[in-house]
């Protein structure tokens, strides 16, 4: 996860380094700034951008087709059309962790086989977060999604 801004250009150099020599796709809700980031990363491509709807404050589907852009130094970036809504409500809370592939080295190394990675003693994933092997914000994002699904 990279904190960046198409408006101020903050963090775009770091993001560009991560995308270098890769094929990447920007996916997300309409109006979040996918095409604006493309314009910040690749000046001159002039990807079409729009304003948020004044009534709904939602994006207006300015990008209607996926577009492929090439980085001069190598690598490709695909700008995809926005989606109205993105949800994980169809998933069981226990399955959310399957999408966090970076947790794999630790998630089955806990003292207890049924570890929920919350407060259990001997949790290898919690230990990895404490050591910095797993980014704390990423771990917190996992728990926010997990608990939101438990509450629904």
Image (cartoon, helix red, strand yellow):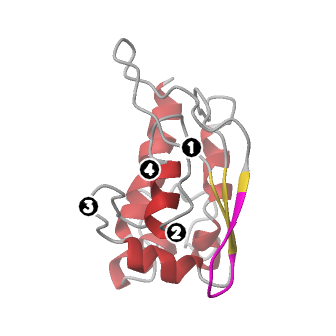
Mark 3 is surrounded, within 10 Å at the Cα level, by few (under 14), some (14 to 19) or many (20 or more) other residues, namely few
Nearer the observer: mark 3 or 4; the answer is: 3
**Residue wearing tag 3:** 8
Tag 4 or tag 1, which sits nearer the N-term? Answer: 1
Magenta region: 68-75
Q: Position of residue 123 (x, y in %)?
A: 47, 70
Q: Helix or strand or loop: what does disc 4 sit on?
A: helix
The correct choice, above or below, for 124 with respect to 60 in the image is: below
Q: Position of residue 50 (x, y in %)?
A: 46, 35
Mark 2 is surrounded, within 10 Å at the Cα level, by few (under 14), some (14 to 19) or many (20 or more) other residues, namely some
Q: Position of residue 61 (x, y in %)?
A: 58, 30
Mark 1 is surrounded, within 10 Å at the Cα level, by few (under 14), some (14 to 19) or many (20 or more) other residues, namely some
Kindly identify which numbered label has been placed on residue 143: 4
**Residue wearing tag 2:** 42
- Distance between the Cα atoms at labels 4 and 2? 35 Å
- Distance between the Cα atoms at labels 3 and 1? 20 Å
In reply to whether residue 36 is colored magenta, the answer given is no
- Distance between the Cα atoms at labels 1 and 2? 19 Å
**Residue wearing tag 1:** 28
Q: Are marks 2 and 3 in contact (CB under 8 Å)?
A: no
Tag 3 or tag 2, which sits nearer the N-term? Answer: 3
């Amino acid at each position: 996860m990279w904190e960046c801004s198409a408006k101020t250009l903050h963090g775009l150099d770091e993001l560009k380094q991560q995308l270098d020599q890769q094929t990447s796709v920007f996916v997300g809700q309409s109006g979040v700034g996918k095409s604006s980031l493309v314009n910040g990363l690749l000046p001159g491509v002039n990807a079409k951008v729009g304003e948020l709807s004044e009534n709904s404050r939602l994006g207006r589907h300015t990008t209607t087709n996926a577009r492929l852009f090439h980085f001069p130094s190598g690598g490709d970036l695909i700008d995809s059309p926005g989606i109205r809504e993105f949800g994980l409500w169809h998933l069981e809370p226990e399955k959310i962790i399957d999408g966090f592939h970076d947790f794999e080295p630790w998630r089955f190394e806990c003292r207890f086989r049924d570890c929920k990675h919350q407060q259990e003693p001997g949790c290898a994933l919690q230990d990895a977060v404490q050591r910095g092997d797993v980014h704390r914000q990423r771990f917190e994002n996992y728990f926010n999604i997990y608990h939101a699904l438990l509450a629904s």
